[in-house]
């Protein structure tokens, strides 16, 4: 998080200062990509679409840093839903094709698969969709319960329950791997 300098950085970005916008992007893009990875391989594309939308609306944005984060993640969720719809339409059309083009393995994908962040995201993907989304929005994006509730269209109580159940399920998944019960204690504070 940027902190006390957020208003100044935001104002600079709204005036067209590239360095100020880059600071906003560097602060929020990593957790945004982790959140979007729930949707699969299109995370980079959805993130790019998200940032395009953010740039278009940047001059009209008003609010503090938490409102900024909520706005960007709300935009990302909408772009992810749109991408999912496009994939569904595309898959309906592709079955009609008489041939399938082989997809070459990408070295970057192989490297990313080996990273510990990817292992954590893979565990989160094993959760029911609502729990996975809530855990990432609370833990990775750092959004509050009311912000997550508004974003996912659920009550704050439902968000707390989903976060709690998701974190408990993750704890059970990692305990057999030798992680001590205290290993996820820092995450417990977000439920």
Image: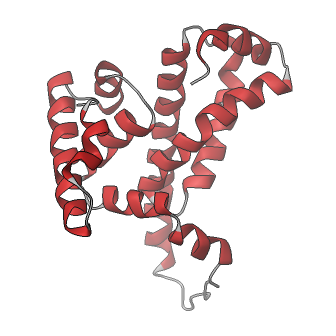
Is residue 166 toward the left or the right of residue 115 in the image? left
Above or below, 115 relative to 5: below
State the image coordinates of residue 94 (x, y, percent, origin top left): 51, 77
The one of 75 and 141 positioned closer to us in this rendering? 141
Which residue is at a point 22% across and 29% down the rendered structure image?
154
Q: Residue 80: x and y, percent?
A: 48, 47
Query: In the rendered image of this protein, does residue 109 appear above or below residue 58?
Result: below
- Measured as percent of width and height from the top left, residue 180 is found at 23, 55
Q: Which quadrant holds residue 1?
A: top right
Residue name at image x 40 percent, y 26 percent: 143
Is residue 130 shown to the viewer in this render?
no
Which image quarter: residue 151?
top left
Q: Residue at x 46, y 30 (%)?
A: 74
Q: Give the camera-side residue of 144 and 79.
A: 144
Q: Residue at x 44, y 46 (%)?
A: 81
For the image, the number of numbered tags is: 0
Q: Residue furthest bottom?
A: 99
Residue 152 at least partly seen: yes
Colouring convention used in this rendered image of the protein = secondary structure
The residue lying toward the viewer, choosing from 129 and 57, is: 129
Q: Position of residue 117 (x, y in %)?
A: 48, 57
On the rendered image, what quadrant is the C terminus found in?
top left
Residue nearest the viewer, comparing 89 with 25: 25
């Amino acid at each position: 998080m940027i902190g006390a300098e957020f208003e100044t950085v935001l104002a600079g970005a709204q005036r067209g200062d590239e360095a100020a916008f880059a600071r906003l992007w560097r602060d929020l893009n990593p957790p945004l990509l982790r959140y979007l990875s729930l949707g699969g391989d299109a995370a980079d594309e959805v993130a790019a679409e998200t940032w395009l939308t953010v740039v278009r609306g940047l001059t009209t944005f008003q609010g503090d840093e938490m409102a900024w984060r909520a706005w960007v993640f709300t935009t990302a969720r909408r772009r992810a839903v749109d991408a999912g719809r496009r994939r569904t339409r595309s898959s309906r059309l592709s079955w009609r094709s008489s041939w399938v083009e082989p997809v070459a393995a990408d070295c970057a994908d192989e490297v990313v698969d080996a990273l510990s962040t990817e292992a954590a995201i893979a565990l989160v993907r094993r959760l029911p969709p609502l729990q996975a989304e809530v855990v990432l929005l609370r833990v990775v994006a750092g959004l509050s319960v009311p912000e997550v509730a508004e974003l996912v269209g659920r009550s704050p109580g439902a968000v707390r329950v989903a976060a709690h159940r998701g974190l408990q399920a993750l704890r059970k998944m990692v305990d057999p791997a030798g992680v001590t019960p205290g290993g996820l204690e820092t995450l417990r504070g977000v439920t």
